[in-house]
Image (cartoon, rainbow, N blue to C red):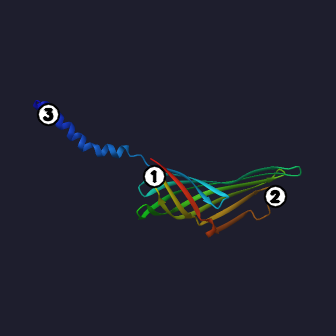
Amino acid sequence: MNIAAFRFYLACVLATTLFSPLYAELEEVPAKEVGFRLIGLNSVDFILKKEKNSNSIFRYRFGFAQIGLSPATNQTSFSFNASLAIGVEKRKELMNKTYFFHGWEPGLAINYNSTNKKGVGQFIPFLGYFIGFAHNFSDKFCMNLEIIPRISATINSGQSINKNNFRIDGSYNSNSIGLGFIYRIR
């Protein structure tokens, strides 16, 4: 092997060794997590999370509590309830595979009920603070328990509303502990 070929070979090995950590960081794709959260058997929220950095995650929670249509001979009723909350989840590892998470979660819930073409709508902006614990069963699957105390304002509108069109609530309900099943995508 001549000297020029040896220098070229050595330069290639050296460049690969020096720059490979940079390529590894460029190829690191933020983790995404999808799943659902159960509160009893009648309320399901869908959750989408996207990693911002190792201990901070963007969180989107979509809740569909009820969609109903009841055509009857005397009265027809329709109802729709949905909510969307967006927050940033902070994580702190407690033990191997178990971590504590928390964060603020502002959101909006919309309820609409109609009976015999008389509709009532509610717009409910809220601010919640979620607190929970999660356990990773594998690199792809984890389960969590969380609770979300919140403060909300209710704005009513519609045809069969009394004079009280605005209300402010604070809620904490120990019966509303959510059980989450999360699948991690890398």
148 lies left or right of 74? left
Classify 26 as above or below 52: above
Quarter occupied by the N terminus: top left
List x then y, in percent, for residue 112.
73, 54
Q: Residues within 10 Å of mark 2 (few under 14, many from 20)?
A: few
Which of the pair 21/109 is nearer the observer?
21
- Taking the spot 42% from the left edge, 58% from the top edge, the residue there is 55
Q: Residues within 10 Å of mark 3 (few under 14, many from 20)?
A: few
Q: Amino acid at mark 1?
A: Glu
Mark 2, mark 1: which one is toward the viewer? 1
Q: Amino acid at mark 3?
A: Phe
User: Considering the numbered disc 2 on the image, is that residue within a helix, a strand or a loop?
Assistant: loop
Q: Amino acid at mark 2?
A: Ser
Q: Residues within 10 Å of mark 1 (few under 14, many from 20)?
A: some
In terms of image quadrants, where is residue 36? bottom right
List x then y, in percent, for residue 126.
62, 61
Give the label on residue 51, or none.
Answer: 1
Report if the CB atoms under discs 2 and 1 are less than 8 Å apart. Answer: no
Mark 1, mark 3: which one is toward the viewer? 3
In terms of image quadrants, where is residue 177? bottom right
- Please report whichever mark, 1 or 3, sits nearer to the chain's N-terminal start: 3
User: Mark 2 to mark 3: distance in Å?
Assistant: 88 Å
From the image, tell me which residue sits under label 2. 160
Which of the pair 123/50 is nearer the observer?
50
User: Mark 1 to mark 3: distance in Å?
Assistant: 44 Å
Give the label on residue 6, or none.
Answer: 3
User: Considering the numbered disc 1 on the image, is that residue within a helix, a strand or a loop?
Assistant: strand
